Image (cartoon, grey):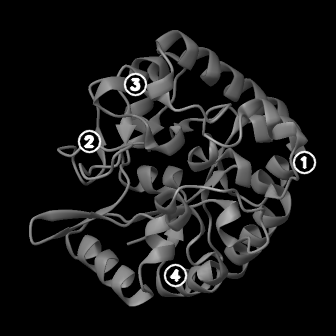
Amino acid sequence: MKNAFTVDLEDWFCSHNLRSQIDYDLWDRLPKRVEMNTLKILDLLSKSNCKATFFVLGWIADRYPDLIKIIAREGHEIASHGYSHTLLTDLDPNTFETDVQESIKAIFSACGITPRGFRAPAFSIVPSTIWAFDVLSKYKFAYDSSIYPVGIHPDYGIGDAPLGIYETDRKLVEFPLSCSNLFGVRIPCSGGAYFRIMPYLVYKHLIGRILDARRRFIFYIHPWEIDCEMPHVKLSATKRWRHYTNISSTKRKLEQLLQDYEFTSIEKILQEENVFINAVR
């Protein structure tokens, strides 16, 4: 059973963790590292004969159209991560719709593809922003991958959401982020900081429990998470720990993950699950 490999395509300064220190208006003035790091990820995927879903930030697509073309040309799925990496909890339906429109336009301009998948910045489809599904349906997205079915994180999560792939009542398929059920407790383990911070054998055990339950595992990573030389920003102790821990070992762990498991794009998995076409109808 193949699992989903996903990349949230953004630069180091786009992260929500840094928003209190780096305003959106400053992005163009900062050193850019996304192209270099993304090419490294593409090389790892190529060596593993792995296809992935790239959730592309519209801001990145506008500035790096050639990079988006390369990703598409290598057979990876192009999906949307919004335009400005603004959390949905900081938007309303109208401003979110504008952000989605700008994202679609930027991605299509870069590579001629209209995205059919969406991931909210920082998984910010939460109970108060479920209205986002109405906007996504309006723009004919087939699926979303924004919901973390966990209730322990302070910034995101829907604690009682299904753990596996399901169809919403807005004619959208939801491919939620992965949690392992351990003694009745949901342990988030889809990627990002969870992947960097956990010892690899612990992480692998959690994946095994997901697969034993006959659920697809979905992994995510940001290009900056393999960048040992990215600029450091002064953060609170908690955010610093979450953002910078084990960056130096991520690439090695990623190589091991790609050796241990078979991955493909979300699009391919949903086709195999026979829900992708149903979602579009």
Q: Earlier in the sequence, mark 3 or mark 1?
A: 1
Three-letter amino acid code of the residue under disc 2: Ile
Q: CA distance from mark 2 to mark 1?
A: 37 Å
Three-letter amino acid code of the residue under disc 1: Asp
**Picture disc at residue 257:** 4
Determine whether the residue tagged by mark 4 lies in a helix, strand or loop: helix
Q: Quadrant of residue 89?
A: top left
Q: CA distance from mark 2 to mark 4?
A: 27 Å
- Residue position for label 1: 66
- Residue position for label 3: 133
Local crowd size for mark 3, using a 10 Å CA cut-off: few (<14), some (14–19), many (≥20): many
Local crowd size for mark 4, using a 10 Å CA cut-off: few (<14), some (14–19), many (≥20): some
- Residue position for label 2: 158
Three-letter amino acid code of the residue under disc 3: Phe
User: Which one is in front in this view, the residue at disc 2 or the one at disc 4?
Assistant: 2
Q: CA distance from mark 3 to mark 1?
A: 30 Å
